[in-house]
Image (cartoon, rainbow, N blue to C red):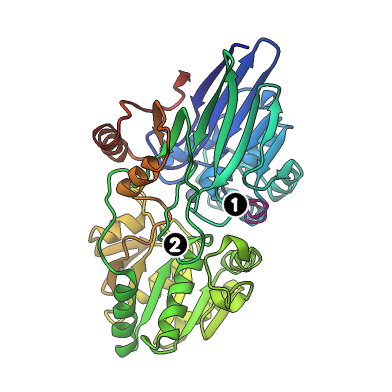
Amino acid sequence: MTSSITLKFFGAAKTVTGSKTLLKFKNNKNSAKVLVDCGLFQGPKKLRELNWKLFPHAEEIDAIILTHAHLDHSGYIPKLVKEGFRGKIYCTPATFELTQIILRDSAHLQEEDAIYANKSKYSRHVPALPLYTVEDAEKSLKYFSCIEQHHWVELCLGLSFQFFRAGHILGSSLAQFSYSEENNIKLLTFSGDLGQDRSEVIKGPDHLTETDILVLESTYGGKTLPKNNIKVSLKNIINDTAKNQGVVLIPAFSIGRTQEILYLIAELERGSLIPILDVYLDGPMSVDATQIYARYPDELKLTELEKGRVPSLTTLRFKIIKTAEESKNLNKKKGPFIVISSAGMLTGGRIMHHLKSRLPFAENALVFIGFQAPETKGRLLIEGLRTIRIHHQEIEVKASVHNLEGMSAHAYSDEMISWLKTMIKLPSKVILNHGEEDSLLALQEKIKRETSIFDVVIADYRQELEL
Ligand SMILES: [Zn+2]
């Protein structure tokens, strides 16, 4: 049976957010339209404005394959449902649990933004409307269908897919499609966000035997794995800050980095390598996500002894901050202590008021543990910015700023090459997405140089590729 597949990139093309790839399948008898990931654009305004564009023919899409919960992969789902999507949304059970908290939070923020825009009259639209509401997010949840990894699901006769473990965050998956082409079975794999085996908390990515075509993310495509010892760096920062009675501020994405850093701090405590300090996890979403992690012990790398116990992801003087008022009260508290709060790239959230009160003092430390996109406050601070504007106020940065490289949930370029090379049959074509242009070019060059794959292309926004 002859069949054809085309891919069209509606996001994460030469950028790291807005992941959305439309896969169109057709054979003599059937056709299907499948969207791999359905993420929000984040970061610079010109990208965020793309979220307001109508997705063409949302009602014709048969299914969404969601690789993982992060907002840049899931955050457009309520809008697509609002625009008429009525198909199934496939993901793993852990991804579904995490996506629920992400979408509710995102909808809440969209509503708050609209209220703020109407109050301050800064919007060109009167009245300003949210991209989607909490009600829209709730409605979209009923289209989810959970499937375990390593189980084939038939989307239509001639097109099936299965998930493999991606090792990026809890529940994260690679999505592999199988379709028949002239009596041959072909495999097309999307890496989603690809993890590595460095995580202390979750298991690393599955090794694939083969794929004919690979759509590969490239967030760290231009970076090789740093040689620093994260545990030693973190230990030194905490000890120095504690000695000076300072506060260690850790901006972290609620899902993924938060659990990794909690585990590392707990490890340092267990080894008596740092003093036992109050560790505040500030943000209801981080708290919920940490509880979800603890519910999936089989996905975790933790030792037998720790399996299934929530305390394995908590420290000895672990404190949960739920309300905004409790969070603000921390500003009055004297160090030493540690605060973990989002947003991870300082794009908003409770971390902002902690920064405002702690950055002007040299005894405090700000520690980055994840990817910082260009133009974000996080990236600018790492690059040496010494005054920062928060809530319309210029804040001087006297606290020390650290970047714990190597803690990212994304594979570095050499790790991607090693992962690729474990395949018995390498792909004949690799399509790169989810990266800034320099990362994409660097990874393209590296794959061509270090493997026998020569057909390596970079996806463009709204580009249609016939496979
Ligand atoms: Zn991700």
Dividing the picture into quarters, in which one does residue 292 lie? bottom right
Look at the numbered disc 1 and give the secondary structure of its residue.
helix
From the top left corner, tell me how far across and down residue 317 is, in percent.
Answer: 52, 86
Q: Residue at x 54, y 74 (%)?
A: 313
On screen, residue 176 above or below 308? above
Tell me the chief SS of the magenta region.
helix
On screen, residue 321 above or below 117? below
Residue on which the image places disc 2: 199
Magenta residues, as a range?
93-99
Dividing the picture into quarters, in which one does residue 198 lie? bottom left
Q: Residue at x 39, y 57 (%)?
A: 408
Q: Residue at x 42, y 30 (%)?
A: 427
**In terms of depth relative to the viewer, which is nearer, 213 or 266?**
213
Q: Is residue 357 left or right of residue 110?
A: left
On screen, residue 309 above or below 332? above
Nearer mark to the viewer, of 2 and 1 = 2
From the top left corner, tell me how far across and down residue 162 is, in percent.
Answer: 62, 38
Q: How many marks?
A: 2
Please indicate, yes or no, whether residue 203 appears anywhere in the rendered image: yes
Residue on which the image places disc 1: 106
- Label 1 sits on what residue type? Ser
- Label 2 sits on what residue type? Ser
Q: Is residue 216 magenta?
A: no
Look at the numbered disc 2 and give the secondary structure of its residue.
loop
Figure quadrant of the N terminus: top right
From the top left corner, tell me how far across and down residue 25 is, in percent.
Answer: 60, 20
From the top left corner, tell me how far across and down residue 140 is, in percent.
Answer: 72, 43
Label 1 Cα neighbours within 10 Å, binned few <14 / some 14-19 / many ≥20: many
Which residue is most to the front?
Answer: 424
Q: Residue at x 56, y 35 (%)?
A: 176
Q: Is residue 354 left or right of residue 308?
A: left
